[in-house]
Image (spheres, rainbow, N blue to C red):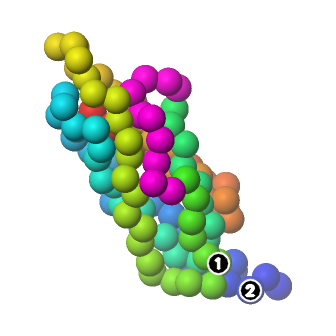
Amino acid sequence: YSKNKGDLAQNYARFIATEAQASALDDTVAIRIEWSRVQWQISSEGTNFINGFSATSGGNENTSGSSTDITVNLANNLTSASRSQNIILTNITTGETSKIAIV
């Protein structure tokens, strides 16, 4: 028997959207992670224009129904080319992953 881990429907970490828009001159974009009874971490997929995050991990296995706002630091887009890069959210407690695209 493991405290709080029996009901996986109550244990989640997820982005509230699948995509976040950033204009060419934006140096940050905000994303939100909803989580409950888990610890989580985020990372960027590959190297492109995401320079870092205001936080790379969070959560608490004893807290239900919470959310965390993250600021994603971006390099300016100095070309006319469109760009996209994924952020991966890993639920450390369950091992599940999900993605959001910064475009």
Q: Secondary structure at mark 2?
A: loop
**Residue 65, image x, y percentages:** 45, 81
Q: Which residues are magenta?
A: 46-55
Q: Residues within 10 Å of mark 2 (few under 14, many from 20)?
A: few
Kindly identify the amino acid type of the residue bearing the numbered disc 1: Glu
Residue 38 location in percent, x, y? 61, 71
Checking the image for residue 3, the label placed there is 2
- Residue 74 versus residue 11 in the image, above or below: above
C-beta proximity under 8 Å, tags 2 and 1: yes
Residue located beneath label 1 in the image:
61
Q: Position of residue 22 (x, y in %)?
A: 22, 38
Residue 86 is inside the magenta segment = no
Q: Residue at x 41, y 72 (%)?
A: 67
The quadrant in which the N terminus is found is bottom right
Residue 5: give x, y in percent of width and height. 69, 78
Q: Do we see residue 64 in this rendering?
A: yes
Element carrying mark 1: loop
* Type of amino acid under label 2: Lys
Quarter assignment of residue 69: bottom left
Mark sitting on residue 89: none
